[in-house]
Image (cartoon, rainbow, N blue to C red):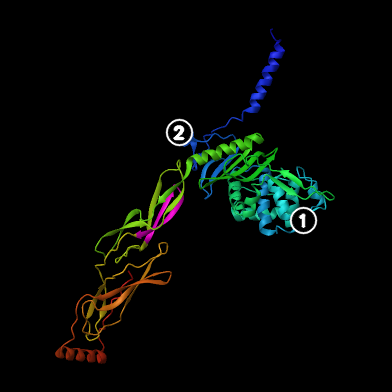
Amino acid sequence: MRLPRHRVLLAGCLTLALLLHAVPALAQRAPSDEISERALATSNASMRVAPDIDAASGILVTDDGRVLWSRHPNAQRAMASTTKMMTALVALQVGHLDEMVTVSKAATKIQDGAGLAAGERLSERQLLTLMLVHSANDAAYALGEHVGGTIPAFSKMMNDEAVKLGLRHTHYVNPHGLDQSGQYSSAADLAKLAHVLMSYPVVRGIVVMRSARIPGRAGHRTPRVYGTTDELLGRYHGLLGVKTGYTDKAGYCFVGCARRAGVTLTAVVMGTQNNAARFTQASRLLDWGFRHVGIRTIASVAQTIAPVPVSGGENGSVAGVAGVAASAPVFDLGGPVKRAIVLGPRVVAPVFAGEPLGTAVCSQGAKVLARVPLLAEEAVRSTRTIGSVPVSDYLDRTVEARVGDVDLTPSFEASIAVRTRLVLRTKVAAPVSPGERLGAIEYTQDGRLVVSVPVVAAAAVPTPGVLERADIWVLRTWRGVFGGPKMAVRRISGS
């Protein structure tokens, strides 16, 4: 039987509506999106591997602040209830979690609240939990009013903290995030704020809760239970929180933090199309990040990093090896990992095995991944003469001083710089034997003496004979009476 045309059209419309409801919003790539802070338009390869994200703006950041992907990260937009992250931060810094708060009548009039009653008393901890888990606007208002005295005063505290944190594209007018002129933030600022907020153990414990529980209203024993607005909890592996947000002006927003295999990422999506879309887009962004970021070994203990030039030694260089093992998150789209060797003014023999020589700075792009102490793999003997010491029995004669040998391997702290100081005797009496100690080179770390290297005579100096002594006495007397040149001791710089 053939159906009437209007029924066919109706059935088609219903089918299309069901399909549109079931399929998430189409994702997007934009030429202005950036991977590792480089626009996709400048790299065809990046365009192919970039995440498909349907959001007005967003960002994906590692725990150490490296931006993996971004779209208009500094665009100032309404941020809805993600505002409550700053409300929580200021309350934690200024307030006291066990202090009781009396809910004002003004707080109860705020829309999209938990139905708090004027005059009821809840602790700051209970309000903080209700605000972060259920996103209750009345709880945020009550908390801000209590901590700041007034909402304008609390908003100023929020803005002061934003300046302190360097949130240059953020401004607050209220503590709950309802649309209001002058209330805005950016994806980059929200990611930075989330990182700071998640440093508080109490926050990490709250934002993973599936529900918030507070006492029942007066006369009711049954506690009030409010579910979380974070629909990724329990569904996304490794999710740590953090905060949802929605208003007509902001659209659907989500700040999500997750950790897998030692890598922690924070994703921010702003201005998505619906409730489901914000979680879909955030999940897609996090998944993409975990595919492309992994913990990689940067250096292994005793791994040869680079040769280090040595002056005044039997060898012109010594192998610099890693003093500690180092690993870090490496972004496979961020370019090669490079090492830069940072040494002191110069490395001078003698050098001891295990002696710190400098630092290997490992970086990827502009991001420093690790700083690895660089140690000498083996000892290098000194072959240099480093000064001269006057021989008191003569007028202008000196004995050359050279670096002696040390029959031990001192124990250095790998991460502490070594400082050396040359100490020479002001004079020595004849006879002087080769190898006679004339001073020392002291190796110290943080003021602690690690090893003292002897400085010894390079040659013999005999005692002057009788006639020579007489000549010396006459010349000294002449100079004492009439003046004359005086021997200057050659001062030697430290090694």
Q: Is residue 373 left or right of residue 352?
A: right
Amino acid under label 1? Val
Front in this rendered view, residue 358 or 390: 358
Residue 42 vertical position relative to residue 493 in the rendered view, above or below: above
Residue 349 — which label?
A: none
Front in this rendered view, residue 485 or 234: 234
Residue 44 — which label?
A: 2
> Quick one: label 2, few (<14), some, or many (20+) residues within 10 Å?
few
Overall secondary structure of the magenta section: strand
Amino acid under label 2? Asn
Placement of the C terminus among the 4 image quadrants:
bottom left
Residue 101 — which label?
A: 1
Name the residue located 69 percent from the left edge and 8 percent from the top edge. Answer: 2
Placement of the N terminus among the 4 image quadrants:
top right
Name the residue located 26 percent from the left edge and 91 percent from the top edge. Answer: 480
**Residue 25 sits in which quadrant?**
top right
Front in this rendered view, residue 474 or 348: 348
Q: Secondary structure at mark 1?
A: strand
Query: Looking at the image, which residue sits at the far front?
Result: 221
Q: Looking at the picture, how far across and down is residue 221, in whole percent?
A: 81, 49
Front in this rendered view, residue 184 or 379: 379
Q: Is residue 477 left or right of residue 286?
A: left
Of marks 1 and 2, the one in the foreground? 1
Any magenta on residue 361? yes
* Residue span colored magenta: 357-375
In primary-sequence order, the first of circles 1 and 2 is 2
**Residue 410 sits in which quadrant?**
bottom left
Q: Looking at the picture, how far across and down is residue 29, in whole percent?
A: 54, 33
Residue 59 in sight: yes
Q: CA distance from mark 1 to mark 2?
A: 56 Å
